[in-house]
Image (tube, rainbow, N blue to C red):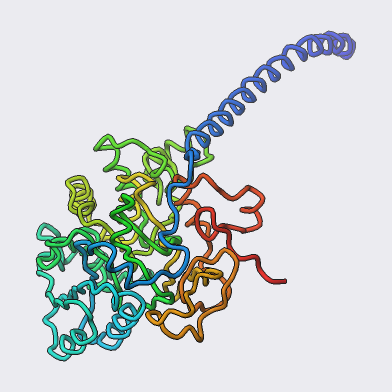
Amino acid sequence: MVLATVKAWPVTARVFRLRRPHLSRRVASNLKVVLCVLVALLLESLLHVHRHAIPRPPKDLDAPFSTQCQDPVVAAAATPRENATLVMLARNNELQKALQAVQNIEHQFNQWFHYPILFLNDEEWDAEFKRVLSSAVSGEATFEVIERKDWGFPSWMDVDAARIQMKAQEAKNIYNGGKESYHHMCRFFSGTFYEAEALKKYKWYWRVEPGVEYTCAITYDPFVEMARRGKTYGYVVSLWEVDETVPSLFRTVDGFRRAKGIGATPNWRAMIQPSWAPWPIRRVLGWFGANHRDYNGDIWNLCHYWSNFEIADLDFFRSDVYRDLFGYLDHSGGFYSERWGDASVHALAVHLLLGPEQLHHFADIGYSHEPFWQCPGNAPGGQLLNSTVLGDASGVSPESEHAIGCRCRCPDERRRNNRGICLNTLQAPAAFHRPTFAQKWRGEYPYTINIPSPVPKP
């Protein structure tokens, strides 16, 4: 038996040696298949990201309306005023903040242009508030109470369930998630503010918040320039949204886009951070509705415009397609089941429905709403220091290279205290001049299109 076993061993060894090349070929073949699949997935991911690239326009499509001081009296007399109003949402207990903001914007702009100011409140106005603010406005002051149908839960909503959801948001420390009035305000400015009776006669509006400060003189008429240059929506600050407040907003807007057959334009793609995940994983993420992802599995970059300042053509908000969009969002329940803000709704809407040439960054306006601000600095040789209309220039910031403001009083030498990443991202469809990869790697983003930020002092 031992001899038989010994004799059998060489035979077994020979069989093993004969089979080993066969097994190696099979493993090699499988490895080739896996490698080919991986390469194919990588190429698909690269192609997917490339398809989301923002094409460079043949020229810059947005530029500051003014790059130095002008004589505001001459500017006001040169062209008729637009059919426009300033709008402030305030409450009676915000008298001092509202007065400060009105006095500030009157000093920096409206003392020369005399636009009316419409004050909105969800409660009856105090006589004292009306008296004080009326005396501070150089144009007409109107005080309107928002109708209950426009400030409150929609008629079809389960109010008890909505309040439970808001309580849950408060328990998670979601910013203003537990404040019912804040949810109402976000819904109002997202979709019903333009229905206010006193606002119906106007084409343009400029939103002003209690407590804001304009830090530069505005010596031209922004409404006239918006109309003359074909602009629809203007903003100052762009930054990231608080992600836990809007987990399903982007997907819901994308659902509307798909339902209406609206294409993914460069302006819309500027809101998207394309996913590097390969197609199967990307599709799964899209199917199961992962936070901030659209139906293709791509991610909203969370960039938006801060809507406490916006100058806009009200015909855009009154359009059928915007009304349809708001209705679609409203019936999803997200203004209460989550804490959707009007700033993100407006930003997603204008990037979905408008072209890049219709958006305007008011780079020449100095603006502060705690905790963020922008301030363009004072244009060299453009401050009209001898102007009796603009008055004493003492205390203004020094003139600086590439600055475009008028009589600015900036907090410091920076042009803004929020990072320029979102502004650069959202302006890309309108920008022929763009920062290089090396500049972005170093965090050197332009102040606005084709205007560099100041070089930091060593």
Q: In this rendering, is residue 262 above or below 91?
A: above
Q: In this rendering, is residue 144 above or below 332?
A: below
Numbered label tally? 0
Q: Is residue 444 left or right of residue 120?
A: right
Q: Is residue 114 left or right of residue 281?
A: left
| Corner quadrant of residue 104 | bottom left
Residue 164 x, y percent position in the rendering? 24, 67
Q: In this rendering, is residue 353 above or below 191?
A: above
Q: Is residue 38 left or right of residue 182?
A: right
Residue 356 x, y percent position in the rendering? 39, 46
**Residue drawn at 90 percent across, 11 percent down:** 3
**Residue drawn at 85 percent across, 13 percent down:** 9
Residue 365 x, y percent position in the rendering? 42, 68
Residue 417 visible to an observer of this rendering: no
Between 205 and 404, the one nearer to me in the picture: 404
**Residue drawn at 62 percent across, 20 percent down:** 33
Residue 162 x, y percent position in the rendering? 21, 64
Between 442 and 380, the one nearer to me in the picture: 380
